[in-house]
Image: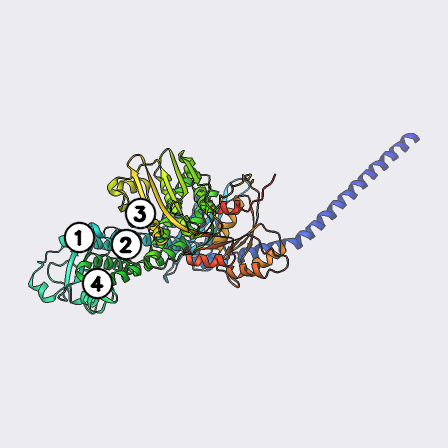
Amino acid sequence: MQPDLKKSRSQLIAVLQEAQEKISRLKNQLEGKRQEREVSKNILPETEHLLRTIFENAPVGIIVSDQQARIIMTNPTADTLYNQQAFYGLDVKTRFQNLHVFRPDGAPYDPRELPLSRSALHGEACQNEEFLFKYPDGRSRWIMVNSRPILREDGKSSGAVAVYQDITEIKELQQSLREREDQLRWRNDVLEGINNIFHDVMNFETEEELGRRCLDVAEQVTQSSYGFISTISRSGYPKVIAVSERGRKACTMPENSAMVREKNLYARGVNGRVLRDGLSVCSNNPGRHPDSIGTPPGHPALTAFLGVPLTQSGTTIGMIGLANKSGGYDDFDLEAAEAVALASSEALLRKCADSRGRKAREEADRANRAKSEFLSNMSHEIRTPLNGIKGMIHLARMTTGEPKTSEYLDYANQSVDHLLELINDVLDLSKIEAGKLEHRFRPLSLRKVVQSCIEPLAARAGDKGIDLRLTVENDLPDNLRGDARHLRQVLMNLVSNAVKFTAHGWVELKVTRASESNRDRIKVRFQVQDTGIGIPRDKQQIIFESFEQISSSYQAQFGGTGLGLAISKRLVELMGGEIQVESREGEGSTFSFTLEFKPLEPLVKAPAAPTVEQPRRKALQILVAEDNKMNQIYILDLLQSLGHTPVLAETGREAIRKLAQGQFDLVLMDIRMPEMDGAEATRIIRNEPPEGVDPDIPIVALTAHALTDEIEIYMQSGFTAYLTKPIDMDELNRILSRQVRIHR
C-alpha cells in the first residue's frame, strides 16, 4: 500500500503543477488583453477624431446614405453644394427641392438616376459622372461624382458613399479654350476673305461686280442674311452698287417707288448716320435706334443691323449695310465687317482709279499700306495662340498611342503649319508694300548660304525619290559682301517650289560666275532647275503676281498662297537683279537671276571644302530660360523626348545664376521675361560674365516676333541663332545638331 500511496501523491503533484502553469498562462493572456483594451481605448478616439477631421475638412463633398438612399452622413462641402444643411434622412426626391440637376446635354436629371441613388438602390459603381446644379438664386455649378455601394461582410449592400467634386472652373477653362479656337478660326476666315477680295480685284469688269464680291465676303464673315454696298456718287448722293441675292428676293418694294424717293433709304436713318459721320452702327433692335425712320411696305423686316463706312484717308466714300444675323451681332462681327470694309475700300478704289485721277491713286497707296499694316498686326496676334496650339498638339501626339487620334493630331498640325506659312508670307508682303524692307549688306560665306538652302529640303526630296543637287563653280570666291538673309529667302522659296512641283527626276541649284564680273565687283548667277510639271507659256508672267497660281486645280493639288514667287521677285529686284523663268509644260522649269556682290578677298580659286566626319548625336545639357507655363511644358517635354537634359530658369537673372552653378552645352533664351529679359541677360553673358559663366556658350533666342528687323536687333545682342515660335521641330534639331561634339 505504501508504494501505491507514494505514486498517487506524485501524480497529484504533477497534475497540480500543470494546472498551476495553465493558470499562469491564462493570467498572462488576460493581462495582455487588458492592456490591449487600454491601448484601444486611447487609440480609437484619436482615430475617430482624425477621420472626422478629414471628413469635415475635405475639399470635396462626401455623402453617405443607407440602402434606401436616405442621407445618413454629409460633410460641410456637400452641404454647400446641395445648398442646404442637416438633410439627414431625406429621400432622393426631397433632398433636391432646393436645386435642379441637369445632364451635360441639358436634359433634366431624374433624382433616382443620380449616382448615389443607383449605388445605394442597385449596388452600381459610378465613375466620373458630370451634371449641372442650378440653384434658386440663379447660380449654377458643374459637379463630377464618383459613388460606390457599401458592402457588408456577406456581400450585401448596406448603403452607398459618393464623392462630389466642383469642376466649374475646369468647365469654364474648357469653354474659354473653345472660344479662343473660335476666334482663331474667325480671324482666319477674315484673312481669307480679304485675300479673296484682292485676288479678284482685276477679274471683274465693273464696279458692281466687285461690290458683289465684297458683299459676299462681308455676309460670310458676319453670317448675315441680307446686305448691300453703296458708294457716294460724283453728285454726292449714295449709289447702291450691290444688294444680296436673298435680300433682293425678300424685298417686294419697287426700287423707284415714291416711298423710296421720299425717305431716301440709303441716305437717311441709320444708313445716313454711317454715311454722314463715318461711324459704324451696330444694333440688335434697329427699330428702336434713335436714328431709325422705319422701313417702307415690302422691305424685309429688320431684327438686327450692322453698318460700317467705306473710307479713304478719313473721307467716307460709301458703306456696307448688313442685317438679320441669327442671334444678333457682337463685337467680333463689328471688327470683321470693319476689316472687310477696309479691304473693300481699297479694292473699289483700285477699280475706279482711272476715273478718280492722281489724288485717288495716292489715296489708294495709303490705303494699301493701311491694309498691309492691318494684315501684319492681325498675323502677329494669331501667332501667340498658334504657339500654344502647336505645342499642345505635339505633346498630345507624343503621349497618345491611338492611331486614329494621332491621325487627327497630324491633320491639326498640318493646318497650323499652313496657317503659319500664310502668316509669314503676308508679313513679308506687307513689309515690302509698306516700303519698310531694309537690306543689310554684310560679309557672308557664299557656299554656306547656298548649302543652308539645300539641307532643310533634303529629307522632303528624299521622301519623294528626287535627286537634290548643289553645284557651285570652283573659282567663285566664298567671302563676299551682300544681303545673305534675303538671298537665302529667295533661294529657299525657289528650291522648295521645285521640290513641291517635281514628282520624279531631279532638282539642281547651280551657282556660277556671270561673264561681266570684274575685280571690284563680281556678278553671281543663281539657277534653280527641275524636271517637274512645268509652266504653260501664257502663265509664266502671272505667277509672279500676288495671290496668283497657274490654276485653281494646281492650288487644290499642291496648296500654297500664291505669294512666294511674288515676294521672291520683289526681293531680287530690290537687291538689283531680275528673276527670269524658262519652262516647258510637262518637262520642267528653270528660274534664274543674277546679283552683284563685292568680294572681300582676291578673286582666287576657293579651296575645296574639307570632308568632315558626320557627328554622332549625344545628349546635351540645355538651360531653358522661359517664363510662360505652357511654353515651359512644351519645350521641356520636347527636349526630353529628344534625349537631352533640360534645366528650367524663369527669368534672365535666374538663367545667369544657373549658368554659374552648372555646366551646359547650350541656352534656349526667351526674349521677354520678368526681372531681366533675354536680350539683357545675353549681353551680360557675352560682355560681363560672372565667375563660372562661359561667355562663348551658344545662346538661341526664342521669340514670337516674326518681323526681321526685330530679329536683327536680337541677333546684335549676342545670340548665336534664333527660333521663331511656334518652334519648328526640324529647325530645333538642326540648331541642336550643330552643338553636338564629334565623338570618335
- The span from disc 4 to disc 3 (Cα, nearest Å) is 30 Å
Reading the chain from its start, which is encountered first: label 2 or label 4? 2
Reading the chain from its start, which is encountered first: label 4 or label 1? 1
241 left or right, relative to 675: left
**Residue 611 at x, y = what percent?**
54, 39
Residue carrying label 1? 209
Q: In this view, does 653 lie above or below 565?
A: below
Q: Which residue sits furthest front? A: 519
Quarter-of-image position of residue 326 = bottom left
- Do the numbered discs 2 and 1 sit on residues whose CB atoms are within 8 Å? no
Does residue 250 appear in the picture of this structure? yes
685 left or right, relative to 712: right
- The span from disc 3 to disc 2 (Cα, nearest Å) is 14 Å
- Considering the image in quadrants, where does the N terminus appear? top right
Which numbered mark, 4 or 1, is in the foreground of this view?
Answer: 4
Reading the chain from its start, which is encountered first: label 2 or label 1? 2
Viewer-proximal residue among 252 and 232: 232
SS label for mark 3: loop
Residue carrying label 3? 562
Residue type, numbered disc 4: Arg
Which numbered mark, 1 or 3, is in the foreground of this view?
Answer: 3
**Residue 155 at x, y = what percent?**
52, 40
Residue carrying label 2? 194
Which numbered mark, 4 or 3, is in the foreground of this view?
Answer: 4
- The span from disc 2 to disc 4 (Cα, nearest Å) is 25 Å
CA neighbours of label 4 inside 10 A, class few (<14), some (14 to 19), many (20+): few
- The span from disc 4 to disc 1 (Cα, nearest Å) is 24 Å
Residue 358 got which mark? 4
